[in-house]
Image (cartoon, grey):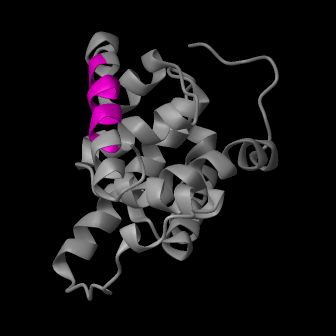
Amino acid sequence: MYQPANIPTFEEIYNCYAPQIFRVCLGYTNDPDQAKDLVQETFIAVWKNLPGFRYQSQLSTWIFRIATNHCLRAIEVAKRMPAVELPFDLAESTEESPEEKLSLLYRCIAELEETDRIIISLELEGLPQAEIAAVVGLNKGNVRVKIHRIKEKLAQKFEAYGQFR
């Protein structure tokens, strides 16, 4: 069993991964408050289970898997709850700030299928495709193809919202 020489403390793990996990959760939920809650749930699970982590995979892979499981559970719960849609038209605004464009990106990601959301969120966090493949249970070649197709879908969504061309 592999165990690194310098095992990081929980605080080091949290400080290293919390911003990335937040962005992944935001990609799922498109709701900053819910994303913060999911980050908290993720790191509670990490804290509880860290002593039993056997280092058979990378620590980051394990943490991202915990986060995606929490996100998927939250989506299942949300599907059972009725949602109220607020009317808005993104095409009305022609001058978008970087924050508004980022918000639109997360909104478009939230519209993707669950696996696509996981993959593109991890890609945006800069995880190697081999690690993404381990998190989602696909081979590296499939992940590479999926990333290309997801980017095409996102470009189409941006066009539909009047953001490209």
Residue 146 highlighted magenta (yes or no): yes
- Say above or below: 88 vs 156: below
User: Which sits in the foreground, 81 or 48?
Assistant: 81
Predominant SS of the magenta segment: helix
Quadrant of image for the C terminus: top left
Quadrant of image for the N terminus: top right
Magenta region: 145-154
Quadrant of the rendered structure where residue 77 is?
Answer: bottom left
- Say above or below: 50 vs 99: above
Q: Residue at x 36, y 56 (%)?
A: 162
User: Which sits in the foreground, 144 or 164?
Assistant: 164
Q: Residue at x 34, y 27 (%)?
A: 147
Q: Position of residue 82 (x, y in %)?
A: 19, 86
Q: Position of residue 19 (x, y in %)?
A: 68, 51
Residue 40 highlighted magenta (yes or no): no
Q: Position of residue 30 (x, y in %)?
A: 44, 65
Q: Residue at x 47, y 50 (%)?
A: 67
